[in-house]
Image: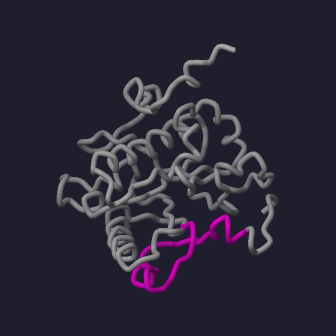
Amino acid sequence: MKKSREEKRKAIIDDGCNPELVAGAKFDGILEIPIIEKPRQMLLPAGITPFTSMEKQTNHNEAIGFYEMDVNFADILINPAKYQAPLREFAAMISPDCSLYRNAPLAVQVANVYRNRAIGSYYQRRGVYVIPQIRWGNELTYTTKYFPEKIAFLGAEKHSIVAIGTYGCIQTRDDKYHFKAGLEEMLFELEPEVVLVYGPMPNKVFEDYINCTKFIQYDDWTTRMHKGGDYNG
């Protein structure tokens, strides 16, 4: 059987990182990061279901999230049109949580911020309720020590709803330092009205910021399953 063009593609940077994703999008900053626009109302999902469990989830009041290994959601980055109909069935989706490893080259971290917002903007312009996932890497992404803009926060509008993830991200002292530093910068830069938190919210990390906005905490998927959660929420 002859393979389609999408099936034959090996790299998601073919054709300039899928320029069709941002046709009609608005852009932010000198790097022209696609914008996920502020919604008219703040929607709080009943839970967050991983992309790889989307087909099994019958509670469509959930948001679809991407808090898993990048390889597990690579297909949506390569062929996003394939998932338009399934995602519209859910209350919301959180833009893909493309990894921003602190030891990765800065170019890779910038590319993954772009990828996150490009996919989110693409679906938002097709009627999906999209919540921007905010992820920062090393201090070059959440400060102006290199770029004149804090690149981790580009493409997300102020006074909106955003999501962050702590699962697996606050294990070491160094992890906690960068997470807190980035969180503080995010709250200052975006002034979000609502912050969805996927994973635990330990006091040592959040106590200084708990009154800065409305935090809504969601258990990670593994914890939900261990508590006896099911696909019906």
Q: Where residue 221 sits in the image (x, y, percent)?
A: 67, 64
Quadrant location of the C terminus? bottom right
Compared to residue 37, the image places residue 6 above or below, namely above
Which residue appears at 62% of the width and 18% of the height?
A: 3
State how the image is colored.
one colour
Q: Check the image and name the residue furthest to the front.
A: 1
Q: Please count the marks in the image.
A: 0
Residue 13 position within the rendered picture, expressed as x and y whole percent measured from the top left: 40, 31
Closer-to-camera residue (62/231):
231
* Relative image position of residue 61 (x, y in whole percent): 73, 55
Task: Tell me which residue sits at (75%, 51%) in the image.
Answer: 60
In-image side of 84 versus 104 (left or right)? right
Specify whether residue 80 is painted magenta: no
Q: Specify the segment rendered in magenta.
A: 197-224
Identify the residue at image location x=46%, y=69%. Answer: 169
Quarter occupied by the N terminus: top right
Quadrant of the rendered image containing residue 135 = bottom left
Asked whether 220 falls inside the magenta stretch, the response is yes
